[in-house]
């Protein structure tokens, strides 16, 4: 399994689900769809994510997640098909960056916008990677969304629950 917790994309537009199906087929390493990583419908939860610095959007209308047009992922550490953690830049350094680059290239080729494209919205910070201080990539790298999501109606049109192709 290359994409864990597909159910977290329930309610998302098919156009955001399809790239993850393609990753399931062709991706180089496992991903996990993060909690709150698909369609968001709870304004209070969105405000909380904003206040915690986990989202740049204060309201659902301001985020592609509020229209089911985004997916947030972690680069999964998997043992015997069970996600036991995710790679982070701070702890895994170059391996995280290698995976981020592969994921970003793959999703861009499918026409998605990558959170990393918004580096200017995030402050860079110095981090210690393999004993060397350097600047963090910044940005929202494990976030992908469809271009033009702002033009879709809000709240979004109801999308039928996702049924994983292999299970159908």
Image (cartoon, rainbow, N blue to C red):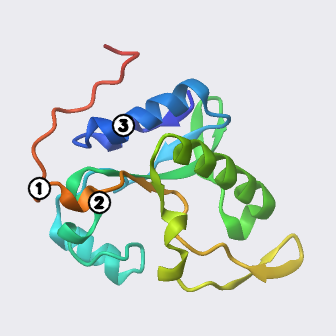
Q: Earlier in the sequence, mark 1 or mark 2?
A: 2
| Residue 140 visible in the shown view | no
- Disc 1 + disc 2, Cβ < 8 Å: no
- Identify the residue at image location x=61%, y=33%: 27
- Identify the residue at image location x=77%, y=64%: 93
3 or 1: mark nearer the eye: 1
What x and y, as percent, mark residue 53?
A: 42, 80
The residue carrying mark 2 is 64
Give how far apart the Cα atoms at labels 3 and 2 are: 14 Å
- Which numbered disc covers residue 17? 3
User: In which quadrant is the C terminus drawn?
Assistant: top left
Q: Answer left or right for 14 relative to 30.
A: left
What x and y, as percent, mark residue 79?
A: 67, 35
| Residue 30 visible in the shown view | yes
What x and y, as percent, mark residue 10?
A: 26, 39
Q: Answer left or right for 161 relative to 26.
A: left
Secondary structure under tag 2 reads helix
User: In which quadrant is the N terminus drawn?
Assistant: top right
What x and y, as percent, mark residue 82?
A: 57, 35
Label 1 neighbour load within 10 Å: few <14, some 14-19, many 20+ = few
- Disc 3 + disc 2, Cβ < 8 Å: no
- Disc 3 + disc 1, Cβ < 8 Å: no
Q: Answer left or right for 45 relative to 18.
A: left
Secondary structure under tag 3 reads helix
Q: Residue furthest toward the right? A: 131
Task: Name the one closer to the observer, 52 or 67.
Answer: 67
Give how far apart the Cα atoms at labels 3 and 1 are: 19 Å
Label 3 neighbour load within 10 Å: few <14, some 14-19, many 20+ = many
Tell me: residue 128, above or below residue 111.
below
**Which of the 4 image quarters holds residue 141?**
bottom right
The residue carrying mark 1 is 153
């Amino acid at each position: 399994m290359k994409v864990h917790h597909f159910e977290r994309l329930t309610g998302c537009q098919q156009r955001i689900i399809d790239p993850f199906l393609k990753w399931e087929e062709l991706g180089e390493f496992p991903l996990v769809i993060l909690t709150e990583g698909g369609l968001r419908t709870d304004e209070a939860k969105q405000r909380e994510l904003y206040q915690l610095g986990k989202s740049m959007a204060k309201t659902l209308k301001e985020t592609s997640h509020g229209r089911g047009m985004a997916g947030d992922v972690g680069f999964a550490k998997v043992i015997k098909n069970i996600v036991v953690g995710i790679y982070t830049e701070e702890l895994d350094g170059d391996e995280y960056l290698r995976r981020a680059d592969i994921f970003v290239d793959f999703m861009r080729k499918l026409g998605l916008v990558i959170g990393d494209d918004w580096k200017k919205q995030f402050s860079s910070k110095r981090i210690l990677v393999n004993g060397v201080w350097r600047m963090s990539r910044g940005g929202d790298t494990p976030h992908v969304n469809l271009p033009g999501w702002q033009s879709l109606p809000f709240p979004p049109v109801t999308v039928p629950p996702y049924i994983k192709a292999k299970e159908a």
